[in-house]
Amino acid sequence: MTSEKKSRRRRFRASGMMAGSKDLLWVLLWLLGIIAMGVWLAFFLNAPARALVEQAFANTLYGAVCVVAFALFMGWAVALALHGLESARRRAPYLVLTFLLNLLRSVPQMVGMLIGYALITGLIRREALPSTASQILLTSVITAVFVFQEVVDLIVERIRHYEHLEFYNALLVCGVPPRVIINREILLKNSLAHLVQKSVSLFGRAIFLICSIDFIISVGLSTEVSLSNLPVTLGSMLAKLDSKQDILVIGTAFTDPRIIGTLFFEHLQGISIAFLIVYTLMCVYRIANGLMERYRL
Amino acid sequence: MSSPSAEQTHRSLRSILLDHLLSVVVVGVALLALSFLVRTKPGGSPHRFGKEIEAYLNIDSVDWSLPLDRALFRDAYRQFHGASEQAVDSVMNAIEDARLADFTDPTRKVGGGPRALTLSAAIELVPMYAAFVAVFFTVLLITYFLARAAAVWKFVLWKQRRSSYLRRYFVALEYGGVKNAILRADLLAKAAAKGFASIVLFSPAYVIAYSLRTSLDTENIFFLVLLAIISNGVLINFANRLYTLMVAESRKGYVDTALVKGVSSGFRWDAKDGLRRSVLLAPVRRSAGHVFREIYRNARLQFIPSTKEHITFIVTGLVIIEMALNIKGHLCYALLQHILYKEFDIAIAIVFGIYLVVKLTEAGVDAWHAIELRKYDNDI
Amino acid sequence: MSEERYDITVAAGRRVLASTQNLVITPGTVTFLFGESGIGKSLLAKALFGIIDDLDLRVRVNGENYRTYCSRPEVVARKTNGFFMFQEPSSHLNPLQSLEEQLHEGALAQAGDPIGPVRELWDARGGADLERLLPVFPKPYRPSGGEKQRVLAAMAFSKMDVAPERTDEGGEIFVFDEPTGSLDREARDRFLDRLFERFRKRKQTILLITHDYGMIGYVQAHHHALLGQIRFRELVLESGRAKVRDFAPERFMRWLGDQRPQHAEYPKTPLLRVESGIQVFGRTLRFLEGASGKGEVDMSIHPGELVYLKAGSGIGKTTVAKIVIGLLNADHFRMEFEGVRLGDVSPRHYWRKNLWGKKMTMAFQHADESLNPNASVEDTLRLLSLRTLGTAEGVTRALEKVFDPEEVARLRRKKIWQLSGGQKQRLNILRAFTLSTPLIILDEPLNALDFESIDRVLALVRDARRNEQAILLISHNEDIFDAIVPPESVHRLESIATS
């Protein structure tokens, strides 16, 4: 075999190996992209705007992490409640809980979140929520309420999967208590990959929903006056007039390609925010997919 | 990967439909009660702020939207009145509230005072509701067929084991020659197009819409439908779900049994043992005698219940588009307006209307699923 | 005829899943391949046949890349003319096609009568049952495991009846992977008869993977004339690689001959008495005495006794076990355990509070499912929270009951998924015995075991009995247990429709 064939084969195999862990690849790509953007902005965007973009990005990420945490906790609690009620053959409470869950499932996320946000702004006006952190926390709870059913479904499905196998029964008849079987044996030891993959995909969904609702609320008034003093996130920043002007330029680039060069140096506030949103959504999606492929979920 | 309604598949169709009906009734009653609580009283005079505040707002040389002007006023006020920080703060807050009221006080709305849910208000909503329903179903159907075709295509490509465009490009770098240069350019162009398509499909609707606002008339219904289909990640998630189901089915045992029986199992396009491209449009009809047909049919049966999740995503997408892009004359934008103007009872009626559409569609999907399952039921 | 020797390696990433240097196939013979499950027999057979999907797995056969191997004309011919009957019947049937459709699919459509082989495998009484079964879509409980397995076997036989498409190279190879795991002895014997009938006609190359050593006895007794064309081989793990050895059938036959039923005197009061006439799932289950199956009795188990519950597959042996252990409630059943009367009206939590892990326990059929694949061997025992397993020595002592000392050292920290099928099954059974409950229920304890392991498990059973523990046994290794269990401890289970 000639040496060039050998090196080609080696390179092919290396890229094949990388494909085996697509999720790690995309985590890396995401981090590199964000860092590259950060460095670029340091050179070409003015300091106050840059501070705002950074703050908005941090708030959005923090909010999304909170959404995932709340959704996991609520999902786990409700799934265990459902399973407990079913095993104890308490039909009426079980049916009521399932009914309520199905009801929530049918509410379009955006509509539900709007109602929730309306309540939050009322609370903020009455100064019941002093700090940014507490506001983000509460908005995250509202968002989590409309996405946690997926966690419930996942956990219930994992429990059912093991109940159909001999696994659950085999441990029961050895005297192992059901809550140990579910929490330690099924969830912790055999479903961690599933839960991580679900968390990643929920993280992406949360970012999308948070940005969208903030955008809607900010844009609803079409002025610089904010409806309330909700913490700044990527969505609300995108809705600001100057950001909107910035991304308008992308459209003109189609008819006037000369402008493409300027996109990298001017209009950076809007373009960087749009980039952060879209790039993060895309990377998170690919990470979730990569995890699914790697662990054959 | 089973959907939430794996349990429901064993319930009779009647009990499932009753369940949906019950949800509608419960939610309807709850919302009705809520709307009575928040009923707006029609009429009413505009809330008046102190004369002083009004006077400040009307100062010619102050532009209240500029931070600089606000800061200057603040200093001037403090100097002039010798007031404490707190007093200054409360005046500034009062001025903010007054400005805010310009946009949210229903009594200041152009076109009269706050409206309650009267018959005339309801009738006004009907054409918007009809438009919403029409757009929703159009988007749902188109997304379903596009997602299905995309999932089948991605599955066949996966089976063909083709490396990505970028990887093939790097491999092609080893060689020289004109033909190879053309191939490389082609691969690079395809990779770029794929990247661009990714960006578009993942972008939230407002990013796309605002990027294009200068070059297209973005407020017509055709654009609305197009945007609802391609943005917000809807198509990608929908297609991916079916694709993952097909991949999982292709690993199951009965596929091996079929292979061993000599059923066609190649995946090259238009080859003797392979698949015809028309399978993208009609996966079952155009794959007779091929193992793909069984993989697809099994995957599809599990896919049907999961379309219910996508219904809510599509509605979420439509809400985002109409609200974020201020598409006047459309239902969701009207919803936002009514919330802002505190006409909560009309808003609740709209929310109920949207919920009804979702529920009806879900009931339809459940009925469809039950019918499909019945085909494979053992009656004995 | 000349032997063909295969050096096969199947790997996923860097992990070798199965590997052997000397898989020997003699064309025109029937090769029985014994050995514990989980060491790669199925994977190696699939690699040989040419049916592995090399998307996730890397396969090399005789030093060749798998794609090259699979495109060899003789391999293609063997695959086209042959058939592979896979191991698990339930996952190898399409839930969206009726059984009849699946029997006519692909190359089977060319057979003159694809349903013929199915009829052959059904017993004479079951004709009407079969007709009712053909239009059925396979679901988890209908058809039963045994019925599904017979359908798959029929597909293989159907293919054997079809004239080969390509007669130029290689002939044909028919692989049967655990073809009788869900069948009772009668059905198994019928399968072997039909298989050899076809073999006599055309002398195809047949590879039969099994751990039912009892087949040896049947073949020697009923197909003696063909012994010259039958090879008995065993796949054994030796330091990570599997070696194929010749297996001397006399080893098993002699061992079987040495087994003697252990008669014993039992105390008058039984530990457990289950009344005959359990009503569940619309059927009534009755216990009949002895191996002959005459006379209805209640099933009684005394301390130190091993009771063997026999029945055809699908009748309800596991159902009875689940009812006794409280995992399933019947419409009507009565039993008395340690003087306490229990039945269908007893509260479900009685078993959980008082019996599970303390007074009774059960070892299920499939060790793969019963053990936590991501727990270590040590953890699996520690989970039992027994004082005796609190220390490392306690765990070692327990493990040494079924594993060699050097095996114990090597395996104790390994995760369950890394063990072979036989090792898993040994651990599964050990777990039940370690609890030292007065009653132990064993469901197919010899499943997946190789010859050596069978001995160790039987030793466990003997020790437990000496310890006054009672054992309820379900197994279709009738060849082995008929030699060990005295007829007075055998019960037959019968199922009739509830009137």
Image (cartoon, coloured by chain):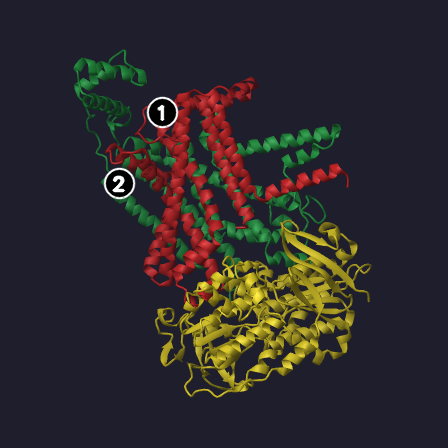
Chain colours: A red, B green, C yellow
Residue A83, above or below C186? above
Residue situated furthest front in the rendering: C393
Picture residue at 41% right of the left edge, 77% below the top: C333
**Chain ID at mark 2:** B
Picture residue at 42% right of the left edge, 58% below the top: A182
**Where's residue C28, x and y in %?**
78, 67
Quarter of the image that includes the N terminus of chain C: bottom right
Picture residue at 31% right of the left edge, 19% below the top: B65
Q: Quadrant of residue B136?
A: top left
Q: Which mark is residue A222?
A: 1
Query: Local crowd at mark 2 within 10 Å, few (<14), some, or many (≥20)?
Result: some
Query: Local crowd at mark 1 within 10 Å, few (<14), some, or many (≥20)?
Result: some
Q: From the viewer's perspective, is B24 left or right of B373?
A: left
Q: Quadrant of residue C126?
A: bottom right
* Spatial separation of the CA atoms under disc 1 and disc 2: 27 Å
Q: Are dots 1 and 2 on a single chain?
A: no
Q: From the viewer's perspective, is B84 left or right of A247?
A: left
Q: Which residue is mark 2?
A: B35
**Where's residue C24, x and y in %?**
74, 64
* Nearer-the-camera pick, C435 or B226: C435
* Nearer-the-camera pick, C301 or C358: C358
In the image, what residue type sits under mark 1?
Ser
**Where's residue C471, x and y in %?**
48, 78
Q: Residue B132: tell me if it is visible.
A: no
